[in-house]
Image: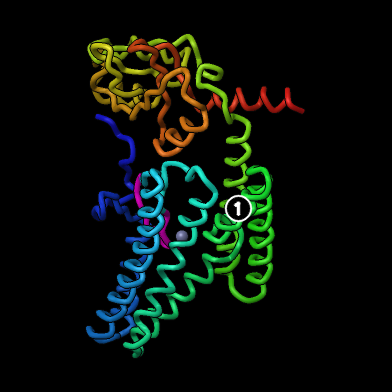
Amino acid sequence: MPTARRSWWTWNVGKIAGIPIRMHLTLVLLLGWITLGYATAGASVRATGLGVVLVLAIFSVIVLHELAHALVARRYGVATRDIMLLPVGGIASLESTPARPAQELAVALVGPMVNLALAAVLLPFRGAFVDQLIYINVGLALFNLIPAFPMDGGRALRALLAMHMPAERATDIAAGLGRALAVLLAVIGLFYNPMLVLIGVVVWFGATQERALGHLKHAIAGVPVSAAMLRKVALVSPQQPLQDAATLLLGQEQLPVMEDGEPLGVITRGDVATALAHAGPDATVAEAPRHEVVTVAPSDPLDLVLDKLRHTPDSVALVVDHGEPVGLLTAEALAAYVALHERRAA
Ligand SMILES: [Zn+2]
C-alpha cells in the first residue's frame, strides 16, 4: 500500500476546485483548545459559538487566499498539490514556479489582493464581528505584502527583480531581505512580544530554504537526469521474499518494486524492517509499505524533476528509457552532483 502523503499529522478536510485541503493536527488541537478556553472561562454558549465561528471564518479567509494563488497558477499551467492549513496560516504547494517572472508576480500578488477585496466587500456590514474580520483581512494582506522571502511580497519582489537581472541574484536579494526582517522581528519580539520571536524564526528558515532552492535550481539548470542518476539499480518484484529486498537494500537506500515492467513504488530499509517485524521472515515484498515513485526519462531536465520530487515525500525518481528502467535519481545522488558541480565552478 503506498503511504505517501498520508500521515498522522495531517487531516483531509475536503477538495475545492479539485485541490485537496488539508489541516495540520496542531491546528485541530489549537481550535479545540480555543473552544475549551471559551467554555471553561464561563463564557455563554453564544459567546463560545461566536468565538468558534470567528476562528472558522479566519481559516475560510486563509483558504480563499491560498486558493487564489492556486487558481492563478493553474491558469499558467502550474498544478497545486494541496493546500495545507497550519496554526500560522496556509501554504499552497505549487508543483513548480511559473515559467515567466510576470506570471510569478501575478500568482504572488493575487493572495493579498483577495484579502483586500474581502475587506472592501465587508465594509458596508460593519459591526463587532465583521470589524474583526476586516482587521484580519487587512492585517493578512499587509503582512503578506512585506517584500521579503518567504512572504508573497518577497516572491513579487523576486519576480520584479528577475525581469532586470539574473534569477539567482534576484532570489538572493529577496532572501537577504527575509533574513534581515527575521532578525528585526526577533529583536523587537524580545522586548515586546515572544510571538514575534517565533515568527522571526519561521521567516528566517523560510528565507534560507528559498535561497538554497534557488541556488540548487541554478546549479542544475539545463542538466539532464542522466548526468546525476545512479546507473546500477537493483529491482524487486512483489512476489520476492522480503529477505531478498533486505539484502539488496544493503547496497542502495531505496529499492523500486516492479511488476510486469510497471513500477509499483519504492521500499526503504525502514519499510522492510517494519514488514519483517509484523509478517515474519517468510513475508514477501508485497507486504511491505511502499512509497510513491516518480518516473522520468534520462533526457528530462533535472530542475523539473526536482519540483516533482520535492512534492512527493520519501520518493525517488525511477529513470525509464523506452520502457526499460535504466537508473535511479535520489536526493543523495542529486546533492552529490551539485557538490561536485559547485566545486568545479569555484
Ligand atoms: Zn499568500
Secondary structure beneath label 1: helix
* Residue position for label 1: 158
Q: Amino acid at mark 1?
A: Arg
Q: Is residue 132 left or right of residue 103?
A: left
Tell which residue pokes out farthest to the bottom in this image.
127
Residue 179 in the image: state x and y as whole percent: 66, 56
Q: Is residue 77 above or below residue 328?
A: below
Q: What residue do we see at 37% from left, 65% from top? A: 30
Label 1 CA crowd tier, 10 Å (few <14, some 14–19, many 20+): many
Q: Is residue 81 left or right of residue 112?
A: left
Query: Magenta region: which residues?
Result: 81-91
* Front residue of this view, candidates 247 and 324: 324
* Front residue of this view, candidates 276 and 119: 119
Q: What residue do we see at 44% from left, 33% from top? A: 309
Whether residue 213 appears in magenta in the rendering, the answer is: no
Q: What residue do we see at 60% from left, 62% from top? A: 147
Magenta segment's dominant SS is strand
Figure quadrant of the C terminus? top right
Residue 221 is drawn in which quadrant? top right
Whether the residue carrying mark 1 lies under 8 Å from ligand 1 is answered with: no
Figure quadrant of the N terminus? top left
Residue 188 is drawn in which quadrant? bottom right
Residue 123 is drawn in which quadrant? bottom left
Q: What residue do we see at 63% from left, 38% from top? A: 215
